[in-house]
């Protein structure tokens, strides 16, 4: 069983059925240069999110693993999309390195009865030699303590040589609070420190990113 602290950290944003648009914000507070090009593929809407991906695009390779990661069915292989020094950040946690990223996402099936991306649209663009960026406009679905919650999100993936080096998840599509995005830098630093503290606690509780046993 996950610890009470882990449950509180991961689930606090889903506990109160408040009307939009205030609900998400309040709940989240509680708890050689390649030519620039863009590829779009369609929104997926179903029990399993689906999309028409451009042949040969980075998104075609990355998205199946990302859907597994957010869908509480990740295996160690899914995290091969990340570079060893990759970072992940959302309003609750900031993970440094693949093992911490594993800890952040391996909590999902321990806390939520359901979790998945149900709708998404991806924009892919080259940002430099061997570099690209995926912008994933999506809706995430969770079920916690008998309550179903849909969360609008913007996921940004920055890739170098085919590996994700930075993964940010902006709930309500709002920038993460840090020293550069808030009017009071001290408050931004406190928000950054809080996310790191939550991540380190979660990392310890999740046995430092230990992979779950592979089903027979």
Image: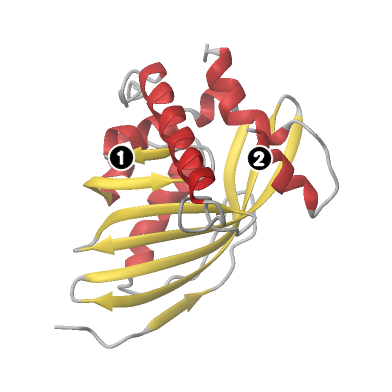
Q: Residue furthest left?
A: 32
Q: How many marks?
A: 2
Mark positioned earlier in the residue sequence (2 or 1)? 2
Which residue is found at the position 46% from the left and 58% from the top?
A: 180
Scheme of colours in the image: secondary structure
Q: Position of residue 78 (x, y in %)?
A: 33, 43
- Vertical arrangement, residue 202 with respect to residue 182, above or below: above
Label for residue 167? Answer: none
- Vertical arrangement, residue 183 with respect to residue 32, above or below: above
Contact (Cβ within 8 Å) of mark 2 with mark 1: no
Q: Position of residue 25 (x, y in %)?
A: 70, 48
- Decide: few, some or many residues near mark 1? Use Cα within 10 Å; few <14, some 14-19, many ≥20: some
Q: Position of residue 36 (x, y in %)?
A: 33, 85
Quarter of the rendering containing residue 210? top left
Q: Nearer the viewer, mark 2 or mark 1?
A: 2
Quarter of the rendering containing residue 152? bottom right
Label for residue 29? Answer: 2
- Vertical arrangement, residue 40 with respect to residue 160, above or below: below
Which residue is found at the position 19% from the left and 83% from the top?
A: 33
Callout 1 secondary element: strand
Task: State the separation of the CA atoms marked 2 and 1.
Answer: 22 Å
- Decide: few, some or many residues near mark 2? Use Cα within 10 Å; few <14, some 14-19, many ≥20: few
Label for residue 96? Answer: 1
Q: Residue furthest right?
A: 19
Callout 2 secondary element: helix
């Amino acid at each position: 069983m996950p610890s009470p602290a882990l449950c509180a950290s991961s689930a606090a944003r889903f506990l109160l059925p408040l009307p939009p648009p205030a609900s998400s914000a309040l709940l989240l507070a509680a708890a050689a240069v390649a030519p620039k090009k863009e590829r779009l593929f369609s929104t997926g809407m179903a029990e399993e999110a689906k999309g028409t991906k451009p042949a040969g695009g980075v998104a075609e390779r990355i998205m199946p693993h990302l859907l597994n990661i957010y869908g509480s069915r990740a295996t160690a292989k899914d995290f091969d999309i990340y570079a060893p020094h990759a970072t992940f950040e959302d309003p609750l946690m900031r993970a440094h390195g693949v093992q911490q990223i594993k800890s952040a996402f391996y909590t999902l099936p321990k806390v939520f009865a359901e979790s998945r991306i149900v709708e998404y649209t991806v924009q892919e663009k080259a940002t430099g030699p061997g570099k690209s960026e995926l912008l994933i406009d999506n809706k995430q679905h969770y079920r916690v303590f008998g309550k179903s919650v849909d969360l609008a999100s913007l996921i940004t993936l920055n890739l170098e040589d085919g590996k994700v080096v930075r993964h940010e998840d902006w709930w309500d599509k709002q920038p993460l609070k840090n020293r550069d995005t808030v009017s009071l830098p001290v408050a931004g630093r406190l928000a950054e420190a809080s996310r790191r503290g939550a991540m380190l606690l979660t990392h310890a509780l999740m046995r430092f990113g230990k992979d779950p046993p592979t089903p027979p």
